Image: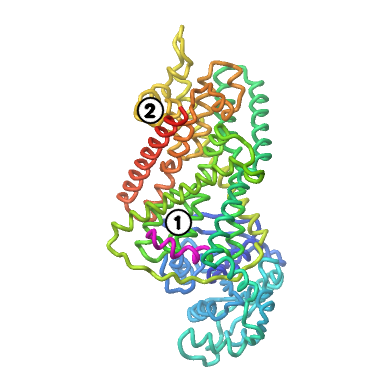
Amino acid sequence: MSDALRIALVGNPNCGKTSLFNHLTGTRQKVANYAGVTVERKVGQFTLPSGKAVRVLDLPGTYSLNATSPDEAITRDVVQGKIAEEGEQDAFLCVVDATNLRLHLGLVLEMIELGRPMLIVLNMMDEARRRGMQINTQKLSERLGLPVVETVAVRNSGVEALLNALDQGKYEKPHTELNGLTGSHHEQAEKILADVVNYVDHEDKRSDFLDKIFLHPVFGLISLAVMMFVIFQAVFAWAAPFMDGIEGFFGWLGEFVGGFISHPLLNSLVVDGVIAGAGGVVVFLPQILILFFFILVLEESGYLPRAAFLLDKLMYKAGLSGRAFIPLLSSFACAIPGIMATRSISDPRDRLTTIFVAPLMTCSARLPVYALLIAAFVPEYSVWGVFNLQGLVLFGLYMSGIVSALVVATVLKFFQKDKSQHTLLMELPSYRLPDLRSVWIGLLDRAKIFLKRVGGIIFALSILLWFLCTFPQAPDGATMPDIDYSFAGMLGHLIQPIFAPLGFNWQICIALIPAMAAREVVVAALGTVYALSVVDEDAMTQGLSALISSGDLGWSLATGLSLLVWFIYAPHCLATLATVKRETGSWKTVGVMTVYLFGLAYFMSFLTYQIASHYFG
C-alpha cells in the first residue's frame, strides 16, 4: 500500500462521516490507537474503478481546528501534517451536513486557509431536499473554490460519483480567495449561504414532532426508561436460542475431542481447560451483540445527544454533566471506551467525576456472570404474562449500577471546590433511519474484539488456572477431591476467611483471582474449578448453572445474591484501571478508584449476604 492514494475524512460530529467510511471500506478497516494517546485511529482500504488502491483515514469529528479536546487535537495535527506516523495526506474529504451548512462551513473555511488539497462531500442531501432546501452545488463550488460532490452516505447514494471524482484527481488546493469574502468565518458562511441556498421550508417537521415526545420533561424520561427496559428484556429473551446452540456445540466438541485423547492429564487440559474455558465465555456472545446492536442503533438514529440533553439537569444534581450520558452509556458495553469518551467533556471536574463512576455501569463483561447466577437462582417464568422474570432481575442489576453511580457522583460533588454549573452546548442532529451497514460493521468489530479476548487473555488464563488447579497432584490415599491439594486449592483456603462474611466459599475465591484480568473469566474459572473438584461423575455432566442451582455445590440463595452484588461494584478489570491511568496520568486516581470500588463491593455484598441469610436462611 506504499503507492496507494492517501486520503483522510474530516468533518463535524454527526455529519455522516463514519457511514461514508463504512460504505467505502466495508470490513477492510482496522482500529488502533495513536502512539502515546488513547484516541482511536481508524484506517481502511478500498479500490477505485481504475484499480488504484486507496488508504483512507477516518479522523475524529471536530467543530474547529482550534482543538479543545484530545480528539480534536489529533484531527488538527493530522491536517497540519504534524503526526509522523500519518505523514502528509494526498487529499482531505471534508464531509459536510447539507442540512446544517451554517455550522459546518466554519470547519471548511478553516481547512481552506491551510491550503490543503480538498474535495467537499455534501452529505445528507436527501434530508436537505425533504426539508425544502435548494442548494446550488455548482455555485457553492465556485464560492469555495473547490469541487463539491453530493452524497447520501447511509443509502450509498453518490458514492460512485465520489469514487470517480477521486479517480480523476478532482481534489485540489483552493484556488480562489473566496471571491473577495471578508470578515469572520461566521460572516463568510452567512454570505455563502445567502448566495447558494434557497429555503422553501425552514422547519424539520419530523424532528420537531419527535422532539416534542423525546425531549418532554415527563414523556421523554418515560420513553428513555421504557427503551432501556426493552433492551434488557431482549438481552435475555432474544439470546436464549443462540446460547443454547453454542452451549450444545461446545459440549459436543469437548466429548468429540476428548474421545481422541487417552492421557488423563492431557484430556483434562484440553476438555476442562481449553474447550470448557473458551466455551464458557463464547456462549454469552449473543447477549453482548444484542446489547451492542441497540446502542449502535440509538447512536445512528440521532437519539443519544437528545438523551444527554434530557438528562442534563438530573445529572447536574448528582455532580455530572449531560455530556456524561454518552460516555456512561458506552460503559454499558465496556468501561474502556466509556472512559475514553470522556475526552468530549471539556470541564476537568465533570470529566474526572464521570471517569470515577463509569466502572459502575454494568459492562458486557458482567453479563456472563449475571446470566450464570440469574439462571441458577431465578425461575424462568413470566410476570403478568408479559415480562420475563430473569430479564426483570437483570434490569434491576443494571439500575443498581446506575443509582450507585449517581450516589457516588453526588458524594464526590461535596468534595469539589468548584460547584458552579457548566452550560451544556451540543448539536442535536436530525433523526434518521440507522445505517444498517454501519450497524453490521460495528457488530462485526465488537464480535472480533470479544473473540480476540477469548483467544488471548481468557484462553491463557484458563490454561493457567487449570495448571494451578491440577498441580501438585493429590497424594496416595487422599480422601478429598484432587483440587484441594493443588496450588489453587491452597490459595483459595488461605483467603477464604476474608470473604467468609460475604458467603463466598474457597472455590469462588479462586475464581475471583483470574477475574481481576477480565470479569468474564470468572465463569470459565468456576467451570474449571468445579469440573476438577466434583467427585460425582453424574454431577460433572451437568451444566455449571444447573450444578449451582441443584445445591450440590453448597451455594445458598444468599451466596448467589452476594456474588451478584459483588460484581456490580468490584473493579475486576485491569485494562480499565490502565485506561484510567492513561487518561488521567495519575496513579493516585487509579489507587483511589480501586480502593473505593473494592470497599463498596465488600460492604454491599456483606449487607446483601447477611440480610438474605436472615430472611431466606
Q: Is residue 512 left or right of residue 197?
A: left
Task: Note whether residue 525 is visible.
Answer: yes
Q: Is residue 5 above or below residue 462?
A: below
Q: Position of residue 362 (x, y in %)?
A: 49, 47
Disc 1/disc 2 C-alpha distance (Å):
36 Å
Was residue 290 drawn as part of the magenta stretch in this picture?
Answer: no
Q: Nearer the viewer, residue 148 or 211?
A: 211
Q: Position of residue 33 (x, y in %)?
A: 48, 55
Judging by the rendered image, the residue that carries numbered circle 2 is 500
Secondary structure beneath disc 1? helix
Q: Nearer the viewer, residue 91 or 448?
A: 448
Q: Nearer the viewer, residue 458 or 223?
A: 223
Residue type at the position of mark 1:
Met
Of all residues, the one furthest to the top in this rendering is 477
Q: Is residue 474 above or below residue 325?
A: above
Please give the name of the residue rendered at 58% of the width and 85% of the height, measured from the top-left corner.
145
Secondary structure beneath disc 2? helix
Q: Which residues are magenta?
A: 307-319
Q: Quadrant of the N terminus?
A: bottom right
Judging by the rendered image, the residue that carries numbered circle 1 is 340
- In the picture, residue 419 is in which quadrant? bottom left
Was residue 309 drawn as part of the magenta stretch in this picture?
Answer: yes
